[in-house]
Image (cartoon, helix red, strand yellow):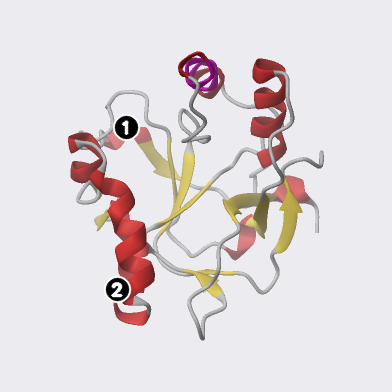
Amino acid sequence: MDAMDCVFHARVDLAEGTSSLLPLSDLAGIDPAAHAAAIAKYDDTPERRRLRDTVVPGLDRRWTEVVFLSPVHPHAIWRAWLEIRGFRRPPLEFWAIPAEELPEGSVLLDRFLTATGDPLDPREVTPFDSASHRAALTTTPQNRAWLEECARRGVSGAWFHGIPHVLAPGPVPLARARVVSWEVAP
């Protein structure tokens, strides 16, 4: 499997009895504690609280009813942090998932008109074409600017801010996925 044909998700423990990445809303009935911990991450600001109920145009699903994946290889973000901060970030593993494995109807969200917590503009959402997808090997200018701002403020979260996201409308199977470290170039 060529990592360039993949989309990426930070490696997480899977809910017991599952072999797929699940939308956050699906966890409520499978693992209530994991659901509560994950949904609590949206409680830090008013914008993020509104985000949970944001509807994705074209999917008619809320933010918590899709799986978020990155079309940018994680090494690009790791390398940007190294260039900006001058030190190596701790190892972090990601699922490299063949794009062809994504559920039908997956879309690409490139948020360039609206802000976090605002309703998405339909022009920010386009169908995801798994057949022509190639992972990006550099981060976006918006992400790099965000990482530079984080470095100035001395914080290190939201590594994928400013990067388009692939949104999958349902479980994402991991049978053909492999694990990659963001320290290792593709």
Please give the name of the residue rendered at 48% of the width and 27% of the height, measured from the top-left corner: 155
Up the image or down, 170 lies above or below 185; here it is below
Q: Earlier in the sequence, mark 2 or mark 1?
A: 2
Please identify the quarter of the rendering in which residue 59 is found. Answer: bottom left
Residue bearing the label numbered 1? 123
Residue bearing the label numbered 2? 28
Is residue 57 among what the camera can see? no
Magenta residue check for 45: no
**Residue 183 placement (x, y as % from top left):** 77, 40
The reply, left or right, for residue 67 in relation to residue 78 is: left
Please give the name of the residue rendered at 51% of the width and 86% of the height, measured from the top-left corner: 17
Amino acid type for the residue under numbered disc 2: Ala
Please give the name of the residue rendered at 50% of the width and 21% of the height, measured from the top-left corner: 154
| Screen quadrant of the C terminus | top right
Q: Nearer the viewer, residue 85 or 14?
A: 85
Is residue 1 among what the camera can see? yes
Sort mark 1 into few (<14), some (14-19) or many (20+) by Cα contacts within 10 Å: few
Please identify the quarter of the rendering in which residue 118 is found. Answer: top left
**Residue 176 placement (x, y as % from top left):** 70, 69
Label 2, secondary structure: give it.
helix
Label 1, secondary structure: give it.
helix
What are the residue bounds of the magenta stretch? 145-151
**Residue 122 placement (x, y as % from top left):** 27, 37
Q: Main secondary structure of the magenta part?
A: helix
Amino acid type for the residue under numbered disc 1: Arg
**Residue 55 placement (x, y as % from top left):** 23, 49
Q: Nearer the viewer, residue 90 or 137?
A: 90
Q: Nearer the viewer, residue 79 or 121?
A: 79
